[in-house]
Amino acid sequence: MEKKINKLAIVGGTHGNEFIGIYLVKKFEKFPDLISRTNFETQTLLANPQAFELVRRYIDTDLNRCFKLQDLENQTKTNYEETRAKFINQMLGPKGNPEFDFVLDLHSTTANMGLTLILVNNHLFNLKMASYLSSVEPDVKVYGSLNPGSENSFVNSICKLGFAIEVGPIAQATLKADLFEKTERLVQTILDFIKNFNEGKLHQINGELTIYKHLKVVDYPRSEDGEIAAMIHPKLQGGDYQQLNQGDPMFLTFDGQTINYDEENSVWPIFINEAAYYEKGIAMCLTKKECITV
Amino acid sequence: MEKKINKLAIVGGTHGNEFIGIYLVKKFEKFPDLISRTNFETQTLLANPQAFELVRRYIDTDLNRCFKLQDLENQTKTNYEETRAKFINQMLGPKGNPEFDFVLDLHSTTANMGLTLILVNNHLFNLKMASYLSSVEPDVKVYGSLNPGSENSFVNSICKLGFAIEVGPIAQATLKADLFEKTERLVQTILDFIKNFNEGKLHQINGELTIYKHLKVVDYPRSEDGEIAAMIHPKLQGGDYQQLNQGDPMFLTFDGQTINYDEENSVWPIFINEAAYYEKGIAMCLTKKECITV
């Protein structure tokens, strides 16, 4: 925790139809003073410009699943996003020994996720920052997307420090002024936090942190031919980060049957009804809520 | 108004990422009894299956702008949607002398449009049905999308009778159970209305109708290079069908300046922040509210 942060990257448009991050990056490029701080350098990156041009999540494959080392090193992986991932890894990385110390990747979601920080590792600096941010901004939630033993494939995996911010609910390919402003304010708070850290002011920071740790994903109920057979239940729609207990409604089939959550342990679902996850077979992610001291 | 309705088409998926209509059509195809009535025939159509397959609004061009007579007759118009429009016109039409008497086209929108009926002509039967539907279902609004002197290019223009239903707010490429059920209930009410009409029970129906008549579209403020320079103002976001007066906030620029509505006449904006209209240069449609007796 002694080492200062010298270079920070703000990434937007890793998915081309997530406009808040894209237009924030454009704003920061137009008004660079907004993101400049005295004791470290900040650069912006529009990660998937072709997907933004066509207003799609991606052209050939999900860019935010292209950052495993073996894929970055694989010469046969040459589609648009695979090539783009290699370029980004060259610019910000290389993964494992990166030029940049901190990567902030700006996403948005159709789920009611507020301002979610997605942690892909347990680095103490990330935990401390997450604790601080959730103490000053009530909309901040912290999702631990940790799969022990398997390498992470997100842009964020280039650096140990940093995380994605997942803002919602917002429809793909739209802007929403209130969420835009909240995200911008959060970015400012993060930059100020790092400035203070570099000045040695935050070495002793301690705090509580509520973290929602990934358990598993749940798919939509499907018919024999693989087609979706139910929708998120109206009582669960928008209920991200709320406790789901055995017997609570989860899905509503097209012919009006309720399907309940039937496991004994309570869970906290998130990414409920995220548009981009239909194709991934994910109706929601189940997490467990933990309170820790960092 | 004497002629009975013999054949009705329920169309879903004219836009491939508008899931409510698509999954309603799939449900009706699985349970045809739901849409069968004794005195007329109902058929379903998934209008743009390739766009649904790729979860996009369209493949080559917006299918719901392909139904002008000169385009349907133009042999050089052969891209996917142009070809598909000719097929649909052959199946339901031909436009002007159609096989089907009534077309119901199911759409959804990211704007807060409730259950909007989009009328493309002033046929008395459509007006009477709109009056009835808005009297029994408070979420129903009626939008008169009439451009006198210019031919309509929607699927609905094949027949004189019928309209599109535009349901929202809902993110593209998602389902929402409450809106799904409301839309299904409205379809049922429409089918029952037609059954009663065919039995001669509704010849004398009279009623009030509040209709929002199209005035013009408004684009986002743009910078010199054509880029969007502002978002829908938070006070207008979701305010579809609410009166907008001179001096009311309309847009918020990325650097925080409010742009007000500056015309003298009050208007009622709709389609506020519809995702698919960013590329069309439409931030919202302005209408005037009229109350008529039909």
Image: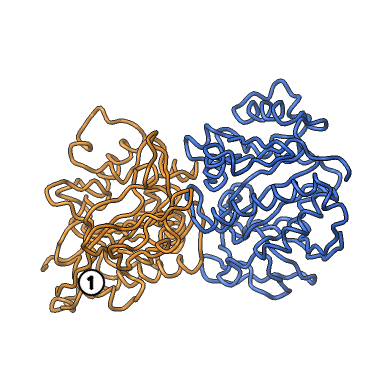
Chain colours: A orange, B blue
Residue tagged 1: A210
A200 left or right of B122 in image: left
- Residue at x 20%, y 45% (from the top left corner): A94
- Quick one: quadrant of the C terminus of chain A? bottom left
Residue B103 in sight in this render: yes
Question: Going 72% across and 51% down the picture, which residue do you hit?
Answer: B118
Element type where label 1 sits in the image: strand
Q: Is residue A245 above or below residue A64?
A: below
* In-front residue for pair B118/A35: B118
Q: Position of residue A286 (x, y in %)?
A: 27, 57
Q: How many marks?
A: 1
Q: Is residue B209 left or right of residue B35?
A: right
Where is the N terminus of chain A found, in terms of image quarters?
bottom left
Q: Residue furthest top?
A: B75
Q: Is residue B173 above or below residue A112?
A: above
Whether residue B153 sits left or right of residue A39 in the image: it is right
* Residue type at numbered disc 1: Thr
Nearest to the observer: residue A2 or residue A270:
A270
Q: Nearer the viewer, residue A79 or B112?
A: B112
Indicate the quadrant where residue A284 lies. Answer: bottom left
